[in-house]
């Protein structure tokens, strides 16, 4: 088998950040990879493939119907477009010009996140206008209600570690508020596929997830929800959705990934991943200046991560320094460094092997040990240092 890293001179990566897009998200099983590869070697009736995948997504999620698009980001755009046009082919052909259509999407300001691109931009791609309610750390039902008007077409709710984690209108109340105005609710739940049944039960109308994150499938976006809105999303393939369609390999790979998910015991999977995180934490417990603990996912996914809080006075480096050194390693080790400004970072071992955990743990120890050794060395005098720099 061809070694792609060697052939194309690519950086080897140990991904301890979780299924982030910038590091290739997850690792697919052999069955998922084989399904995608076999799909590429034949012709298919694509309408039929969309239908079969939608039927499977409905059985998995408990929703009325399902639809696949090229990514969860494009799923946001097409979900908004579906709410704007319904199944009116004239309106579908008119987008992204919203003239004559309801086109305002209301979102809580604390949910207006950047996941690699601004969610507002994904909404605007449909021709819609974003209306933000409240402030970053506080939104009330009254503020949401105030923005709902004659041009409101939907409410957007986001479930992500990027969002405000307090001071916002919770999902159940959000759904009730918009449904009281006969308006649909769209949920961006890109990394929340383990919670899909609960999200469908919330009454939300369209739930958007990423296939390539914890589902460990190919790059695609899975949308579950109301049959009429799912049909309207599918019809966007004859309009702006043409640029966002998923191919045959993506559909077959997604089918295989969902079938695998439906066959597993979620409790056993959760326990196995928690044990894996604990095993990684055990490798790191006695590093000077680094406090190690386990942290559960804060928005409900059954994922356990290792949290490392760094005391620079003892470790000789701060959290950002350690993350930078890990990334400069060979192979490059990618931590989950969203909170280095606060003095801590996370390691998520879901998609790595035991051998890779050993490499990462040993390298982290080495980084701190080297920093400690360097801090023990006497500093050069100013003239000596200056002359050394000149040389």
Image (spheres, grey):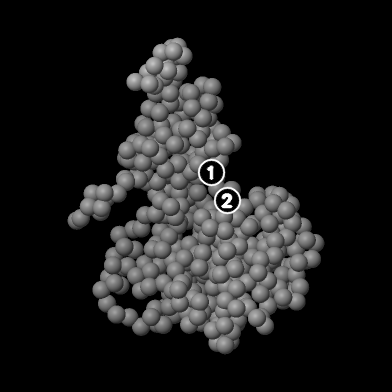
Q: Is residue 169 left or right of residue 163?
A: right
Q: Nearer the viewer, mark 1 or mark 2?
A: 1
Residue 33 figure quarter:
bottom left
Q: Is residue 275 visible?
A: no
In the rendering, at what x and y percent does residue 30 appear?
A: 30, 59
In what quadrant of the picture does the N terminus appear?
bottom left
Residue 129 placement: quadrant: bottom right
Q: Is residue 260 above or below residue 354?
A: below
Q: Which mark is residue 161?
A: 2
Percent x, y for residue 15? 40, 46
Secondary structure beneath dot 1 equals loop
Look at the picture and state if 15 lies above or below 38: above
Label 2 packing within 10 angstroms: few (<14), some (14-19), many (20+): some
The front one of 234 and 74 is: 74
> Residue 284: x and y, percent?
44, 31
Q: Which residue is mark 1?
A: 338
């Amino acid at each position: 088998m061809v070694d792609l890293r060697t052939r194309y001179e690519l950086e080897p990566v140990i991904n301890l950040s979780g299924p982030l897009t910038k590091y290739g998200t997850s690792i697919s099983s052999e069955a998922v990879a084989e399904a995608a590869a076999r799909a590429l070697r034949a012709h298919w009736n694509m309408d039929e493939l969309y239908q079969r995948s939608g039927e499977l997504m409905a059985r998995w999620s408990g929703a009325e119907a399902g639809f696949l698009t090229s990514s969860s980001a494009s799923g946001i755009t097409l979900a908004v477009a579906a709410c704007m046009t319904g199944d009116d082919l004239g309106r579908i052909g008119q987008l992204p010009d919203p003239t004559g259509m309801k086109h305002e999407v209301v979102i809580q300001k604390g949910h207006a996140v950047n996941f690699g691109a601004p969610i507002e931009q994904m909404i605007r791609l449909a021709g819609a206008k974003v209306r933000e309610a409240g402030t970053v750390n506080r939104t009330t039902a009254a503020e949401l209600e105030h923005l709902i008007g004659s041009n409101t077409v939907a409410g957007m709710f986001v479930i992500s570690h990027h969002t405000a984690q307090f001071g916002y209108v919770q999902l159940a109340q959000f759904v009730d508020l918009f449904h009281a105005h006969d308006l649909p609710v769209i949920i961006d739940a890109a990394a929340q596929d383990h919670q899909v049944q609960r999200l469908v039960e919330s009454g939300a109308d369209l739930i958007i997830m990423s296939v390539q994150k914890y589902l460990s499938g190919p790059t695609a976006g899975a949308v579950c929800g109301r049959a009429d809105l799912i049909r309207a999303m599918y019809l966007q393939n004859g309009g702006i959705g043409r640029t966002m369609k998923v191919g045959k390999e993506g559909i077959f790979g997604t089918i295989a990934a969902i079938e695998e998910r439906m066959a597993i015991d979620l409790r056993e999977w959760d326990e196995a991943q928690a044990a894996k995180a604990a095993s990684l934490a055990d490798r790191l417990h006695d590093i000077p200046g680094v406090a190690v603990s386990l942290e559960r996912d804060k928005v409900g996914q059954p994922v356990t991560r290792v949290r490392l809080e760094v005391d620079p006075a003892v470790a000789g480096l701060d959290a950002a320094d350690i993350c930078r050194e890990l990334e400069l390693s060979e192979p490059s080790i990618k931590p989950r460094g969203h909170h280095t400004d606060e003095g801590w970072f996370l390691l998520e071992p879901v998609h790595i092997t035991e051998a890779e955990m050993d490499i990462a743990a040993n390298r982290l120890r080495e980084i701190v040990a080297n920093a400690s050794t360097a801090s023990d060395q006497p500093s050069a005098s100013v003239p000596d240092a200056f002359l050394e720099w000149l040389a």
